[in-house]
Image (spheres, grey):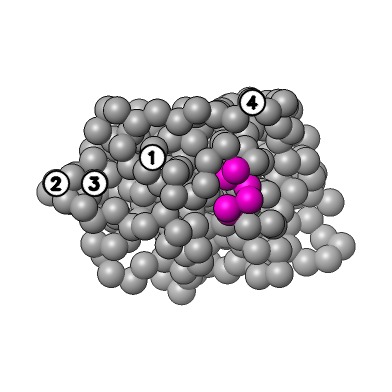
Amino acid sequence: MRLSHSPLTMTIRLASCSWHARRAAVLPALAVAVWLGVSTAIGGESNVHRSANFVVKASSRPTAQKIAQAAEEYRLQFATDWLNQEVPEWESPCHITVDERATGGEGWFSYETSRGSAPNLQIVVQGRLDRIVEYVLPHEVAHAMLCTALAGPLPRWADEGVALLSESESQRVRQQKTFAQLASAGSVMPLSDILQVVDYPAERRELIGYYAACYSLTEYLVAHGGRQRMLQFVADGDRHGWEDSVRRHYGLDLAGLETAWRSSNHGNGRMEVASLPDVAVPKVSPAE
């Protein structure tokens, strides 16, 4: 799930991804309905374009080709920025369905896998084409990369935080402003709660705050240690506990991290990163 909003409008985007290995993700009911409806309406292989890692179905072949090219570029950029290495082509391509509309911008991602078969990756993007390319597509491609390239799926907050950080600058600024407003009002979710969230908050206001907090926390950790350190912190925290992981990677306890993170939004927060060797990115695990 992904949410973006402005003072006048709000758009909710759902993205479902397995963030615990034992729990396979499925598209929410709404996304399933959209997927089936869009696929039926588009029809025809003349509107499909295949690239190295994506099969895109759209209203026309040029549109499908444009989306496939953009998706490949976002995939490569993600690998460069977050994994610091090339990622092998997926054995089974990710299928993208494009539902071009006059307004809006939203998307869904699903990831299903079974033993002995390649992961089934599905993306639905819906709305204005410029918005799809600007921020919907990079968000969903980031989810796909996180689910397939790392040795184990990420916790919910990190999965969304990284995807939000992969969006356009205008969307990142929007998240920053939202978090600043929440921080000023004293409405930021406690760090301990953010780290433990499995299901999205049901209430809209809480959902807005949760997304802004996921973005802000991820941005802060990346700014104070880099992307690879942040990913390793998340991997270790999910396996061994957050208190131990934050001490190991940032030299603080959770309370200290929360204080530094929150105060940073007033311009005076500083976090001294522990003197540690370069941390290795979680092992890339090509789909088999």
Q: Is residue 177 left or right of residue 136?
A: left
At horizontal 33% and vertical 57% (from top left) the residue drawn is 189
Closest to the observer, 193 or 146: 193
Q: Earlier in the sequence, mark 4 or mark 2?
A: 2
Q: Earlier in the sequence, mark 1 or mark 3?
A: 3
x and y percentages locating residue 201 in the rendered image: 36, 67
At horizontal 66% and vertical 70% (from top left) the residue drawn is 23
Disc 3 secondary structure class = helix
Residue 210 is marked as none
User: How far is mark 1 from mark 3, CA to CA?
Assistant: 11 Å
Q: Are marks 3 and 2 in contact (CB under 8 Å)?
A: no
Marks 4, 2: nearer the viewer: 4
Mark 4: which amino acid? Ser
Q: Earlier in the sequence, mark 1 or mark 2?
A: 2
| Span shown in magenta | 242-247
Mark 3: which amino acid? Ala
Near mark 4 (Cα within 10 A), the count class, few <14, some 14-19 or many ≥20, is few
Q: Is residue 162 above or below residue 108?
A: above
Q: Are marks 1 and 2 in contact (CB under 8 Å)?
A: no
Residue 245 in the magenta stretch? The answer is: yes
Seen as rendered, the residue at the extreme right is 116
Mark 2: which amino acid? Pro
x and y percentages locating residue 176 in the rendered image: 29, 37
Residue 261 is marked as 1
Q: Which residue is mark 2?
A: 7
Residue 275 is marked as 4
Residue 41 in the magenta stretch? The answer is: no
Q: Is residue 135 visible?
A: no
Q: Are marks 3 and 4 in contact (CB under 8 Å)?
A: no
